[in-house]
Image (cartoon, helix red, strand yellow):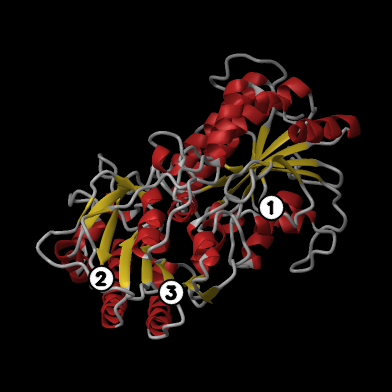
């Protein structure tokens, strides 16, 4: 394989062409998230390492909801949403199960649906529930909140309001569709048929991943004002409102040295209980040691329902909530996606925004903060929270260990290197004389995957001997320092040189590669990069300029 060393050794001084190309893109004004595709070419200017007929592919990303569309385009024989190479016949493996309809092998199959979630308990007791959100958060308020179950439970309805499609990025419209979410919630509050209403305001999380301070503050203030309307409507109809979040984002907008951090955080999130039956004077208060797993048991107890034994979360309220006998109980759960609780410092954009509603609710009603990151949501210690883990733990009422922890543990105990799906893909490549392609996010902090998993796959490929191993990298700024992508790509190029296996041949921003809104033009750009080599050509050169 051209430009690839054939033995382990010192890599200092050897070229890192793709990392150098990413740095050139930075100087031209590009950034990781929306990086235009870069492709490696040989001395004849022919793209190197394209995905071709009969090749083996391992898509090593986690989570999966943003990985489905790209996988469809590469694996479905009758895919027709944009022109594709017919009958690629790939030996395709995904790290986890992205969608059961995909014709792929799965290295770490789902452990199954999480049983006896809050939604399950509500259904078992004959209560009607409705979930309302923008399309940007549809999978979180449905699939993840329901314990990795896509189908509604009996008595469950869903209202999915389209997120704006008339803007390139959401900072151009930071209000998104929050007003429509609010209107739908107010309408259902007035309908006594619904026992539990669950609503998600997406703005803070979605806009918070974009480096636009003014837009983020507008998103925060939009959510605050819409929350005020729904809480007033809930109080008017005697409905108890729980206000919380799934993880933090913009309350820690700056790294210590002042660089912008567009990712999620390890901050706690708010919890407020607004109940017409709770008297003033502090007779009812909140525990101070709570986490997201405590939300479901709290809601069930407020509804007068027993929590199942598998729910290890505990009631967050301390004190008696006095209601007249036979009073019907209804709950509104409002999830302010991405709203963390910061320290009020210079980098706390929530504190800098005008939030009279949240300020007033926090000072008037029982309130506390909940742990929403790391081990509290089944992630490695110190890891930032995310929407998948957050919603899943809100609904499950107990800790569910993440796929990342499963994969990390498999690497530690060695079972990763005996994984049948990985070995099948590599054996097929070796037997057919075809390349092996590794594609996915190149990051440590991303909830979609870890560079450590990529490096473990390179180690496994070295042991099992496919002659050609190509890496198709996706970059993103979420949780990363500025220009971190180039450092990650250089790390991968150095490691591939050291062990004598692998070559980074494509780099593209995750904005193009990881979509879940059927923006097929983005997926087509990624497909054409991986399969045809469309992108800025890069030749192996003498190293950094």
Q: Residue at x 57, y 54 (%)?
A: 36
Residue at the extreme front of the image, as rendered: 325
- Where in the figure is residue 257, as x and y percent of width and height? 25, 39
Relative to 20, residue 369 above or below: below
Q: Quadrant of residue 205?
A: bottom left
Q: CA distance from mark 3 to mark 2?
A: 17 Å
* Disc 2 target residue: 323
Is residue 451 left or right of 380 when viewed as pictured? right
Mark closer to the observer (1, 3) = 3
Residue at the extreme left of the image, as rendered: 281
* Disc 3 target residue: 195
Tag count in the figure?
3
Instruction: Determine which of the numbered discs, if any, sits on residue 529 in the image.
Output: 1
Does residue 13 appear in this view? yes
Is residue 414 left or right of 327 when viewed as pictured? right
Query: Mark 2 or mark 1: which comes first in sequence?
Result: 2
Q: Residue at x 62, y 20 (%)?
A: 498
Mark closer to the observer (2, 1) = 2
Circle 3: element type:
loop
Give whichever of 72, 319 is nearer the camera.
Answer: 319
2 and 1 marks in contact (CB < 8 Å):
no
| Structural crowding at the residue carrying mark 2, measured as other residues with C-alpha within 10 Å and reported as few (<14), some (14–19) or many (≥20) | few
Is residue 505 left or right of 309 when viewed as pictured? right
Circle 1: element type:
helix
| Structural crowding at the residue carrying mark 1, measured as other residues with C-alpha within 10 Å and reported as few (<14), some (14–19) or many (≥20) | many
Q: CA distance from mark 1 to mark 3?
A: 49 Å
Q: CA distance from mark 2 to mark 1?
A: 62 Å
Circle 2: element type:
loop
Q: Residue at x 79, y 28 (%)?
A: 466
């Amino acid at each position: 394989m051209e430009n690839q060393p054939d033995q382990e050794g010192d890599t200092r001084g050897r070229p890192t062409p793709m990392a150098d190309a990413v740095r050139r893109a930075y100087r031209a004004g590009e950034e990781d998230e929306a990086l235009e595709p870069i492709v490696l070419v040989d001395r004849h200017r022919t793209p190197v390492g394209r995905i071709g007929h009969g090749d083996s592919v391992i898509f090593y990303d986690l989570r999966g909801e943003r990985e489905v569309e790209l996988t469809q385009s590469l694996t479905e024989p009758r895919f027709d949403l944009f022109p594709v190479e017919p009958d690629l016949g790939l030996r395709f493996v995904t790290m986890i199960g992205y969608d059961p309809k995909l014709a792929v092998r799965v290295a770490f199959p789902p452990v199954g649906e999480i049983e006896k979630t809050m939604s399950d308990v509500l259904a078992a007791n004959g209560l009607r529930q409705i979930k309302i959100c923008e399309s940007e958060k549809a999978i979180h308020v449905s699939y993840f909140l329901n314990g990795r179950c896509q189908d509604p439970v009996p008595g469950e309805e869903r209202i999915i309001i389209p997120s704006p499609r008339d803007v390139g990025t959401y900072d151009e419209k930071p209000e998104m569709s929050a007003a429509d979410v609010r209107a739908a919630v107010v309408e259902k509050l007035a309908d006594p048929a619904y026992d539990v209403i669950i609503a998600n305001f997406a703005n803070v999380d979605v806009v918070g991943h974009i480096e636009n301070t003014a837009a983020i503050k507008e998103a925060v203030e939009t959510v605050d004002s819409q929350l005020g309307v729904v809480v007033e409507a809930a109080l008017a109809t005697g409905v108890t409102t729980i206000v919380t979040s799934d993880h933090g984002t913009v309350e820690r907008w700056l790294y210590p040295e002042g660089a912008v951090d567009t990712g999620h955080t390890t901050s706690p999130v708010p919890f407020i209980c607004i109940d017409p039956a709770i008297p003033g004077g502090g007779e009812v208060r909140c525990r101070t040691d709570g986490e997201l797993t405590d939300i479901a048991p709290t809601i069930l107890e407020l509804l007068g329902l027993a929590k199942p034994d598998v729910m290890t979360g505990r009631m967050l309220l301390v004190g008696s909530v006095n209601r007249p006998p036979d009073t019907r109980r209804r709950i509104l759960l409002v999830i302010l996606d991405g709203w963390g609780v910061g320290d009020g410092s210079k980098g706390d954009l929530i504190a800098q925004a005008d939030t009279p509603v949240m300020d007033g609710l926090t000072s008037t009603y029982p309130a506390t903060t909940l742990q929403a990151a790391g081990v509290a949501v089944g992630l490695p210690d110190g890891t930032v929270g995310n929407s998948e883990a957050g919603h899943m733990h809100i609904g499950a009422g107990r800790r569910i260990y993440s796929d990342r922890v499963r994969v990390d543990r498999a690497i530690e105990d060695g079972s990763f290197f005996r994984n049948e799906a990985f070995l099948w893909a590599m054996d097929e490549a070796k037997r057919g004389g075809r390349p092996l392609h590794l594609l996915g996010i190149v990051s440590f902090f991303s909830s979609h995957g870890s560079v450590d998993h990529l490096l473990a796959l390179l180690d496994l490929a070295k042991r099992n001997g496919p002659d050609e191993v190509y890496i198709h990298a996706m970059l993103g700024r979420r949780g990363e320092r500025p220009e971190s992508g180039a450092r990650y790509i250089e790390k991968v190029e150095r490691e591939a040189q050291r062990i004598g296996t692998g070559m980074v041949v494509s780099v593209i921003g995750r904005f193009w590669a990881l979509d879940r809104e059927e923006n097929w033009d983005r997926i087509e750009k990624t497909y054409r990069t991986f399969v045809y080599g469309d992108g800025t050509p890069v030749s192996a050169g003498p190293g950094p300029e």
